[in-house]
Image (cartoon, rainbow, N blue to C red):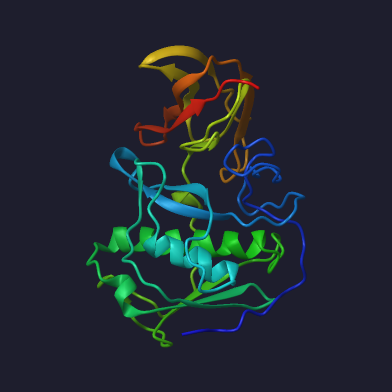
Amino acid sequence: MSLAAVVASCGTAADRPDHNSEAAPGIASAPMNTDTAMEGVATEQAPVYWVGTGDQSRYLFREFRTPTSQDTTDPVAQAALMVTSATPADPDYRSLWSAVDTVGTSVSPDGTITVDLPAAAFASQLSSQDARVALQQMVYTVSAAAVTAGLLDSSTAKEVRVLVNGQSGYKAFGAVELNAPLTRDSALAAPVWLVDPQTGAEPKSPVTVFARVLPSVRDARWEVLEDDRVVHSGNIAPASPGSDPTTGTELRTSVTLDPGTYTVRVSGTDDSGTTVSDDHAITVRAGD
């Protein structure tokens, strides 16, 4: 199954790791709003969105991953395949899709992204709510991949049309009919998000902590822990009143750490009163 990729004019790239990210060194920084572009060069790593677990199960979180399939050079198809078959690096994340080894994609200059999947990708029977979150996982990922690869400009409105074996109207996960294009639901973006360092990173000291917190979050904090002992921490200033709810407050701070294993965490309380957090385990290397 293969659809030809239609290349739009290359512009700036979005959904990128930080300049100093150990997971993807030398790449331009991640924007606050994932639809906002920032200047940068193309990267082989793809932004992949995962579903949280526990109290975070209604939110989507992002990792930057090296494509696992060598069967296609299409960056949008590679990202879509990772949604179905890759395993998140962070154990707090998960995917609601079933693994497949083929996917067709096309991107038109007007912002329509078409993803053609085998029915096997929808093997799980999900509730209507979980099915919608799963579809948003795919929508966020392929739209980010299209911008990162330069196939679409970040300012272009994006719709994702999901086909199953080349046909529309399939009942995804036994719960949602795919009879219309989908767009990103901003309510599903994680309100507290540790952008960098990523899970499994092995940076040298000093380590840059880069996080985003949406205006709906109260009492936001960042912490660096060693064996459950807080070694660095601080508050994150709230967004200004009247701020766009889809953009957030950016925290970027540098901490000096001895070689060892640490957990970096960002947390806060969302508008429903639930504590939400994002934490990544890292290993700080000794300097040269």
Q: Residue 285 falls in which quadrant of the image?
A: top right
Image spot of residue 43 (x, y percent): 66, 55
Quarter of the C terminus within the rendering:
top right
Q: Nearer the viewer, residue 225 or 251?
A: 225
Q: Residue furthest bottom?
A: 167
Image spot of residue 73 (x, y percent): 59, 71
Determine the residue positioned at 30% across, 59% down. Answer: 129
Determine the residue positioned at 56% across, 68% down. Answer: 76
Determine the residue positioned at 51% across, 15% down. Answer: 233
Q: Nearer the viewer, residue 4 or 159?
A: 4
On the rendered structure, is 228 left or right of 116? left
Image spot of residue 188 (x, y percent): 44, 50
Determine the residue positioned at 40% across, 49% down. Answer: 88
Q: Residue 211 falls in which quadrant of the image?
A: top right
On the rendered structure, is 140 left or right of 31? left
Image spot of residue 230 (x, y percent): 43, 13
Task: Say if 108 sits above or below 235 in the image.
Answer: below
Q: Nearer the viewer, residue 96 or 283?
A: 283
Q: Could one spot residue 176 in this view of the protein? A: no
Q: How many marks?
A: 0
Task: Say if 187 sits above or below 199 in the image.
Answer: below
Q: Could one spot residue 81 in this view of the protein? A: yes
